[in-house]
Image (spheres, grey):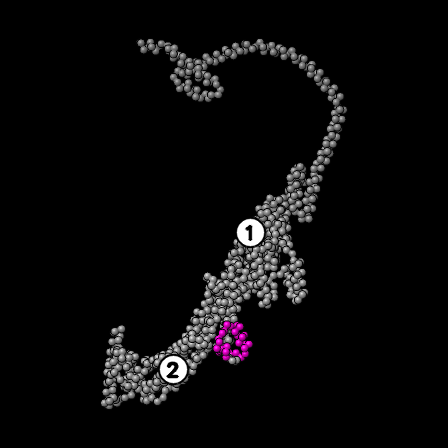
């Protein structure tokens, strides 16, 4: 009951206030047109179960409130609305009356202004025409200058005044055409101007290409003129437009170089070279004699003018094209094109002809083209602002220099004519000096000249080798006969020969050396002169030139002359007499070396006492040649002995000797006697020569005797020789006796005692042992210093004894029936056994 009573009680006031507030907010949200209704309505239905009914009650209450407010507002304004309608009805009648009056007035005005309107339209039409005429005149005044300028542009293009035409185009585009740009003809004109610019660029570029082709063809003439001007005056082609002056005030070094070159040219002319090295405009100066030639030379010097690059080349295409591209804002393109083309031309200029090394003209044309190319580049460098830079020209020059050096190194290596190499050197000097005057570095060219100098010396050495060979071939290798004092003085002037004994002799007389000696000495001096020619103008001190001359002369003596002497000595047709004369000749050439030293000192003015001065090696050269000649003498003697030995024809099975020496051996001894008489002609005018001649003769004689003894011993011990009879041994002994008699006859003076006979001591003891058959003494005294057969080797004796043993067996078939023969055979067998034991003992001991 209590619970039901509680439920029937009304809600407390706080609950009603809260519910009123909530529904008030919901209704406020519904009245707002900006907020979405979905959320608001959802909040109503999501509340308590009876919320919807309560919300509808609140909503109806709110609608009733709004209706009451609208009704109040309409009641408030209703009277004002009725009053306004009443007033409007009153005004309508007055408005209709006013409208009729306005219409009437308008009709009257239209009728009155119709004539005025007609006249006004006429005036307006006239004013429009007048204004159109003024505008036309004004526009024509603007267009006429444009047309005049365009006509002027066409005229400038017709007369190839491209730079002025570009200026006119610039004025048209910047000043004239913009004021009348809306006209069609101006638009066409504006479209034409870029095409005209392109045509101007093409034409100017075509002119530039023609210019580049022209200077490529004529660069050799430009270079020829520049090198000729330097060679003649020591000055250079320079750019007058750049304000460069002629480098005529040369330093002392330049003046000295120029004088050296002129001196070389004069020497060349004196040698018969009448063709000038350089000519201007293709004209070659003719030779005149007497006073007329002198006057002609003076007139040429008086009329000669200093030439500039402008005098030889028209550079206007370059300037014009440069200005045009500069105005067109495309200067960089032009610069790049010009430099690219010049690089290509540089490569073409630096490409030599394949046969350039064959003639001087080939080298000259090559140098002229290069000089002409860089003369043009130097002018462009100084006459234009930035078309080429110093860095660009230096880059071109460094590239060219490397190529030039490679080309010259290659082509000069093909040249085997020293005169051509000398011409090349002179041209390189002028080439280097000319380009150095334009500011180019040429040190590497002078370094190249030192390489070419070595090659020049090689060509000289080859040339002089042929000269020496010809001299040796034509020499008769006999002392020089002198019939008169004039002949004697002539020889002494060419060769420093001094001999008091010979000078005292009456004419006719003979000099100890042959004709080749003064000729060789003269040719060595000529070689020194030729080597000196290359050293001129190389900017080197006298000491360096002296050193170069001495080194090249040493090469001539130690390699060329020495080689020729060695080959001469080895030639088959050179006999003993010629070899003896060669020894005499080398002796006198050796003595003349000190005069060659003085000769070099005189032409270089360098004292031989100077530190590091190179000495001549002629002494060693001629000593070596002399030793080779001596060795060849010994060799030829031995070969001749072998030839005689080959004629020997022993009958090794003979029972008795002939009682006389063999014929071949007597012929050999006679040959040796006559040969050793030749050695008396060796120089012996002083103690040194006497000692030398005696030594050579003694050595040759001893060598011949030893070789003869060795050959005879080999003949006995020849393995192919199987049997030797006692009679053959006796015959062989007679031949050896003749050899000993020859040795004891002192065929060459100077031997002490029986020194020469000792060459045959081995043979003598071996033959005595077999002739006497003294085996008991040999075997008993073997190994003792006092042995009678000390020089007989057991193996040698055994080999010969076995040959005789075989002979005894063969020739004595019935020897076993004779007691003496049987005893002898047993003795031989016993000796053979003992000798074999000695040989075996020697082999075991060794």
Residue drawn where x is 45% and y is 73% of the image: 587
For the N terminus, the quadrant is top left
Q: Where residue 746 is drawn, which disc sits there?
A: 2
- Based on the picture, tell me whether residue 490 belongs to the magenta stretch: yes
Q: Secondary structure at mark 2?
A: loop
- Quick check: is 553 in the magenta stretch? no
- Residue 836 vs 167, above or below: the answer is below
Which is nearer the eye, 307 or 743?
743
Residue closest to the eye, 399 or 232? 232
Regarding residue 332, the answer to whether it shows in the image is: yes
Earlier in the chain: of badge 2 and badge 1, it is 1
- Residue occupying the point 24% across, 81% down: 780
Q: CA distance from mark 2 to mark 1?
A: 85 Å
Local crowd size for mark 1, using a 10 Å CA cut-off: few (<14), some (14–19), many (≥20): some
Could you say where residue 546 lies in the image, as x and y percent from the top left? 50, 63
Q: Position of residue 365 (x, y in %)?
A: 58, 60
Q: Which residue is mark 1?
A: 393
Which quarter of the figure is the C terminus placed in?
bottom left
Would you say 77 lies left or right of 140 here? left
Q: Reply above or below: 795 against 315.
A: below
Residue 374 at x, y percent in the picture: 57, 54
- The stretch of residues the image draws in magenta is 478-505
For residue 754, the mark is: none
Q: Which of 686 and 462 lies nearest the eye of the viewer?
A: 686
Within 10 Å of disc 2 (Cα), the crowding (few <14, some 14-19, many 20+) is some
x 76%, y 24%: residue: 115
Q: Is residue 186 left or right of residue 656?
A: right
Q: Quadrant of residue 55?
A: top left
Foreground of the two, 3 or 142? 142
Which element is circle 1 on?
helix
Residue contact at pointers 2 and 1, CB within 8 angstroms: no
Relative image position of residue 634 (x, y in whole percent): 40, 77
């Amino acid at each position: 009951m209590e619970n039901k009573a509680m439920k029937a009680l009304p809600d407390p006031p706080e609950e009603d206030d809260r519910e009123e507030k909530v529904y008030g907010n919901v209704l406020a949200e519904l009245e707002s047109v900006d907020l979405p209704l979905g959320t608001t309505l959802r909040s109503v239905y999501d509340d308590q179960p009876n919320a919807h009914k309560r919300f509808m009650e609140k909503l109806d209450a709110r609608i009733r409130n709004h209706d009451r407010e609208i009704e109040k507002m309409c009641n408030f304004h209703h009277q004002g609305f009725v009053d306004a309608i009443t007033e409007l009805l009153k005004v309508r009648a007055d408005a209709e009356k006013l409208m009729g009056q306005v219409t009437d007035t308008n009709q009257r005005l239209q009728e009155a202004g119709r004539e005025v309107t007609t006249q006004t339209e006429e005036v307006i039409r006239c004013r429009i025409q007048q204004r159109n005429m003024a505008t036309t005149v004004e526009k024509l005044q603007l267009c006429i200058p444009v047309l005049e300028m365009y006509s002027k542009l066409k005229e400038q293009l017709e007369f190839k005044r491209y730079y002025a035409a570009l200026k006119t185009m610039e004025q048209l585009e910047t000043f004239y055409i913009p004021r009348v740009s809306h006209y069609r003809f101006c638009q066409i004109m504006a479209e034409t101007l870029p095409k005209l610019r392109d045509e101007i660029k093409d034409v100017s570029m075509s002119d530039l290409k023609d210019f580049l082709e022209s200077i490529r063809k004529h660069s050799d003439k430009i270079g020829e003129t520049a090198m000729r001007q330097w060679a003649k005056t020591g000055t250079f082609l320079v750019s007058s437009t750049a304000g460069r002056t002629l480098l005529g005030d040369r330093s002392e070094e330049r003046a000295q170089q120029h004088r050296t070159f002129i001196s070389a040219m004069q020497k060349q002319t004196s040698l018969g070279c009448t063709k000038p090295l350089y000519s201007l405009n293709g004209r070659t100066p003719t030779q005149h004699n007497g006073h007329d030639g002198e006057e002609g030379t003076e007139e040429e010097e008086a009329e000669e003018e200093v030439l500039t690059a402008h005098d030889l080349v028209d550079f206007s295409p370059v300037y014009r094209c440069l200005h045009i591209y500069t105005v067109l804002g495309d200067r960089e393109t032009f610069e790049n094109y010009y430099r690219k083309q010049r690089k290509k031309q540089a490569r073409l200029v630096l490409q030599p002809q394949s046969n350039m090394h064959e003639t001087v003209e080939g080298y000259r044309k090559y140098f002229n083209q290069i000089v002409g190319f860089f003369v043009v580049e130097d002018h462009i460098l100084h006459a234009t602002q930035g078309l080429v830079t110093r860095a660009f020209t230096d880059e071109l020059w460094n590239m060219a220099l490397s190529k030039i050096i490679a080309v010259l190194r290659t082509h000069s290596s093909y040249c085997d004519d020293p005169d051509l190499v000398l011409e090349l050197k002179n041209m390189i000097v002028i080439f280097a000096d000319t380009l150095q005057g334009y500011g180019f570095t040429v040190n590497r060219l002078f370094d190249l000249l030192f390489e070419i100098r070595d090659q020049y010396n090689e060509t000289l050495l080859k040339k002089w080798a042929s000269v020496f060979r010809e001299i040796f071939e034509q020499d008769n290798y006999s002392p020089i006969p002198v019939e008169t004092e004039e002949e004697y003085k002539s020889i002494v002037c060419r060769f420093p020969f001094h001999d008091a004994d010979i000078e005292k002799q009456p004419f006719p007389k003979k000099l100890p050396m042959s004709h080749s000696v003064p000729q060789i000495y003269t040719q060595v001096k000529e070689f020194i002169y030729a080597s000196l020619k290359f050293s001129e103008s190389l900017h080197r001190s006298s000491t360096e030139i002296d050193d170069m001359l001495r080194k090249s002369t040493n090469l001539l003596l130690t390699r060329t002359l020495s080689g020729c002497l060695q080959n001469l000595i080895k030639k088959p047709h050179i006999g003993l007499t010629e070899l003896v004369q060669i020894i005499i000749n080398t002796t006198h050439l050796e003595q003349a070396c000190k005069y060659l030293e003085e000769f070099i000192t005189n032409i270089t003015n360098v004292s031989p006492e100077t530190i590091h001065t190179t000495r001549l090696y002629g002494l060693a050269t001629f000593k070596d040649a002399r030793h080779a000649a001596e060795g060849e003498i010994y060799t030829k003697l031995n070969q001749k002995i072998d030839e005689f030995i080959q004629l020997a024809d022993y009958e090794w099975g003979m029972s008795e000797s002939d009682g006389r020496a063999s014929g071949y051996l007597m012929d050999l001894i006679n040959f040796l006697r006559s040969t050793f008489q030749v050695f008396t002609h060796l120089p012996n005018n002083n103690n040194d020569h006497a000692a030398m001649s005696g030594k050579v003769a003694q050595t040759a004689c001893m060598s011949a005797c030893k070789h003869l003894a060795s050959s005879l011993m080999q003949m006995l011990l020849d393995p192919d020789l199987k049997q030797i009879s006692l009679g053959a041994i006796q015959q062989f002994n007679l031949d050896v006796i003749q050899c000993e008699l020859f040795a004891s006859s002192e065929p060459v003076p100077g031997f002490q005692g029986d020194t020469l006979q000792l060459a045959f001591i081995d043979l003598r003891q071996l033959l005595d042992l077999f002739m006497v058959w003294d085996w008991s003494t040999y075997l008993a005294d073997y190994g003792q210093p006092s042995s009678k057969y000390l020089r007989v080797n057991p193996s040698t004796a055994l080999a010969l004894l076995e040959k005789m043993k075989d002979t005894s067996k063969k020739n004595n078939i019935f020897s076993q029936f004779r007691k003496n023969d049987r005893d002898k055979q047993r003795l031989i067998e016993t000796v053979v056994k003992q000798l074999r034991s000695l040989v075996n003992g020697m082999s075991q001991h060794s």
